[in-house]
Each structure stands twice: as C-alpha cells, then as structure tokens.
Image (tube, rainbow, N blue to C red):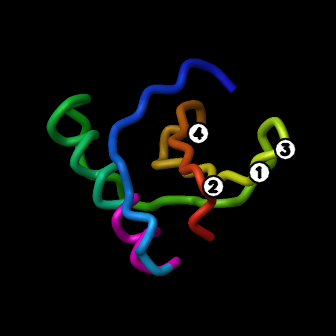
C-alpha cells in the first residue's frame, strides 16, 4: 500500500450500509472537488487485511489508485 491520506471521518455509529454510502459519497466529493475527476462510472470494493486490520479497498475506475476505509465497510 502506498501513501495514504485521510479524506473523511465516518461516524462509529453508522450502520454498515450507512458507512459504505458515506464512504462512497466522500470519495465522489473528493474526486470532483479536489482531484477534478469526473464522477466515477462504477466502484469495485473488496475487503483486504493490512497489518492485521480489516479494511475495504475501493477502486473508482482507475485500476491503479484506490481508496481504503478503516474499519472495513463491507
């Protein structure tokens, strides 16, 4: 895993669906406002283990750059 920078803080009280939805909204907002990307046409998400911690990896269509959530939202 390369350089990671936080873009959002999700609420611990969110349900799994709510946390997943909030994460995707934060990513879409970041891509539009900061990175100046067009909104992604699709997302691919899967869980991975990073140093013993379960995270969700989110590909927003680039196939080379990813967002990660901690804790996992799937």
Residue under the point 40% across and 77% down:
18
Nearest to the eye among marks 3 and 4: give it.
Answer: 3
Secondary structure at badge 3 equals: loop
Residues at badges 3 and 1 in contact (C-beta under 8 Å)? no
* Image spot of residue 44 (x, y percent): 57, 59
With 68 as the anchor, is 28 left or right in this view? left
Residues at badges 4 and 2 in contact (C-beta under 8 Å)? no
* Residue corresponding to mark 3: 52
* Residue corresponding to mark 1: 48
First along the sequence among labels 1 and 2 = 1
Which part of the image, by quadrant, shows the N terminus? top right
Residue under the point 34% across and 38% down:
7
With 69 as the anchor, is 36 left or right in this view? left
With 53 as the anchor, is 12 left or right in this view? left
Residue range in magenta is 16-23
Question: For residue 34, what is the image quadrant?
Answer: top left
Secondary structure at badge 1 equals: strand
**CA separation in Å, label 3 and label 2:** 13 Å
**CA separation in Å, label 1 and label 2:** 6 Å
* Residue corresponding to mark 4: 63
Task: Give yes or no for residue 2 being in the magenta stretch.
Answer: no
Residues at badges 1 and 2 in contact (C-beta under 8 Å)? yes
* Residue corresponding to mark 2: 56
């Amino acid at each position: 895993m390369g350089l990671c920078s936080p873009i959002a803080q999700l609420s611990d009280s969110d349900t799994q669906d709510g946390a997943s939805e909030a994460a995707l909204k934060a990513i879409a907002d970041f891509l539009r406002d900061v990175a100046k990307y067009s909104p992604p046409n699709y997302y691919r998400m899967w869980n991975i283990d990073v140093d013993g911690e379960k995270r969700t990896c989110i590909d927003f269509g680039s196939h080379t750059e990813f967002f990660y959530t901690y804790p996992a939202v799937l």
